[in-house]
Amino acid sequence: MTTAESNYPDSYYLHTANSIKHRSQLTESIDADVCIIGGGYTGLLAALTLSEKNYRVVLLEANKIGWGASGRNGGQVGSGHNKKIDQLEKDYGKSLARELWNLSEYAKKIVKDRIIDHQINCDLRHGNMTISNDPKDDVEHSHYVEKLNKDYDYDSIRYVDQEEVYDIFHSPFFKGGGSLDVGGMHLHPLNYALGLADAAERQGVKIYENSRVLDYSKDATSDVTTDHGKVRAKMVVLACNAYLDKLEKRIAGKIMPINNFILATEPLEESEARYINRDNVCAHDNKFHVHYFRMSEDNRLLFGGGENYSTKFPKDLKSYVRKTMLDVFPNLKKTKIDYAWGGTIAVTANRMPHLGRLDSNVYFAHGFSGHGIAMASLAGTVLAEAIDGSTGRLDVFNKVKIPTFPGGTFLRWPGFYLGMIYYSIKDRL
Ligand SMILES: Cc1cc2nc3c(=O)[nH]c(=O)nc-3n(C[C@H](O)[C@H](O)[C@H](O)COP(=O)(O)OP(=O)(O)OC[C@H]3O[C@@H](n4cnc5c(N)ncnc54)[C@H](O)[C@@H]3O)c2cc1C
């Protein structure tokens, strides 16, 4: 299958996908208990969980399963949220911080259990490192580890000093220590999404691709309309993330789309791969504009870095990301870059996910702010639980207020853009 036929970006993930199915477009009018809009992790986990509870579920995807961030991301499954535990406690108090931490542990369990239960072949491995670029951050790293060990009974994480960081990655870029979390994982993101879709179909979910939802009616039974068909559904789940656009203006101002880019080198020799990643972990630094990397199963370096806030990706993505990769791994100067691609993330103003209920029959989840493998998997599950009458986990998320970006739907760009520029300059300094 060519990428044009599949409509996926030409990524390493596409070339190593287990199997890309052609699912039909919706061309008729059908009924469902729940209509899910969006075929990423959020939509797929909601669909799978609801169908296990005997709901008749239809999932509509504008492109292909995993076409969005779920099929393009860095594959890093971290613990916790996109705010460190101290910050969670400061912002929301110790009790809610604990509830949020418990949810994040449940999120990792969902990912792992789904992979095991449905035998999804997606190169799952343990080991997730946070590294620092500045020795001044070492105190913060060791404090973070100690806090998780002592106050949260989480002993899968340990502090790693600067010397060991160098021994693991041999990168002159990282000038501080870090933490190694063996409860964190990494995986092939597109194969995870494709495996979830297969599992959902086996459970009875009807999935339609190339079926963009144009509108949905806000009635007790909703008419969800695509170009060529319609679903009449008792419940609707919006799982569109960064691509929500104008489909639901009431929540669009809570998220901002950001583009982020990844490359895959040619396969490295085993010794080269172990030189730059001794323990085959995934890793990211603590810059605002994060650098992240891991090895693929065939020993390519998958390296992410660089982002923009435009509707377009840079033209020459390979050169664009390579420049940053060489800052981190200058020894790869002669290494060929085989693939480079971009994806779009939805971020919220406080980097916490935004999920909830809009009308009595409309649920949504988005804004995982680059932390979505675990969080979107959790969000889909939590929405399904809420639709089925168990709102406990959704209630926890609803205690966290998500600010609206100033300027509303259309005028929010300028302030956001200036903020991003400010943090970029801070990173460089
Ligand atoms: C480059 C990159 C790197 C990342 N790295 C990581 C990482 O290492 N670790 C991590 O945890 N997270 C990472 N993320 C974030 C993570 O991928 C996302 O948070 C997660 O995939 C979101 O899943 P989702 O299902 O909510 O959205 P998506 O996967 O984006 O899915 C939304 C889907 O909705 C569909 N859609 C939208 N509108 C409509 C419509 N009107 N009708 C029908 N369908 C529609 C889209 O086509 C899309 O397929 C990264 C993201 C990117 C882009």
Image: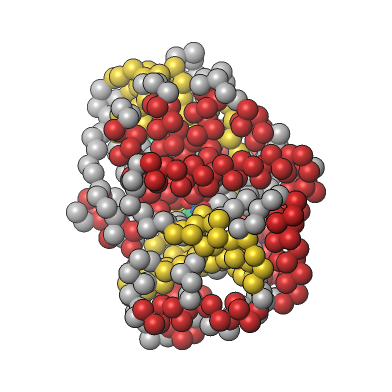
Report x, y in % for residue 364: 53, 32
**In the figure, 275 relative to 188: above or below?**
below
Please identify the residue farthest to the top as the structure is shown.
Answer: 220
Report x, y in % for residue 27: 24, 27
Closer-to-camera residue (95/416):
95
Please identify the residue farthest to the left as the structure is shown.
Answer: 1
In which quarter of the view is residue 353 placed?
A: top right
Report x, y in % for residue 191: 34, 51
In which quarter of the view is residue 178 placed?
A: bottom right
Residue at the (24%, 50%) spot, across then down: 19
Quarter in which the C terminus is drawn? bottom right
Residue at the (40%, 53%) spot, across then down: 189
Closer-to-camera residue (89/326):
89
Residue at the (38%, 41%) spot, across then down: 117
In which quarter of the view is residue 149 placed?
A: bottom right
Quarter in which the N terminus is drawn? bottom left
- Residue 87 visible at all: no
Report x, y in % for residue 190: 36, 52
Q: How many marks?
A: 0
- Residue 155 visible at all: yes
By what rule are the colours in the image chosen? Answer: secondary structure
**In the figure, 104 relative to 305: above or below?**
above
Residue at the (60%, 77%) spot, across then down: 165
Closer-to-camera residue (264/25):
264
User: Does residue 1 appear left or right of residue 155 in this picture?
Assistant: left
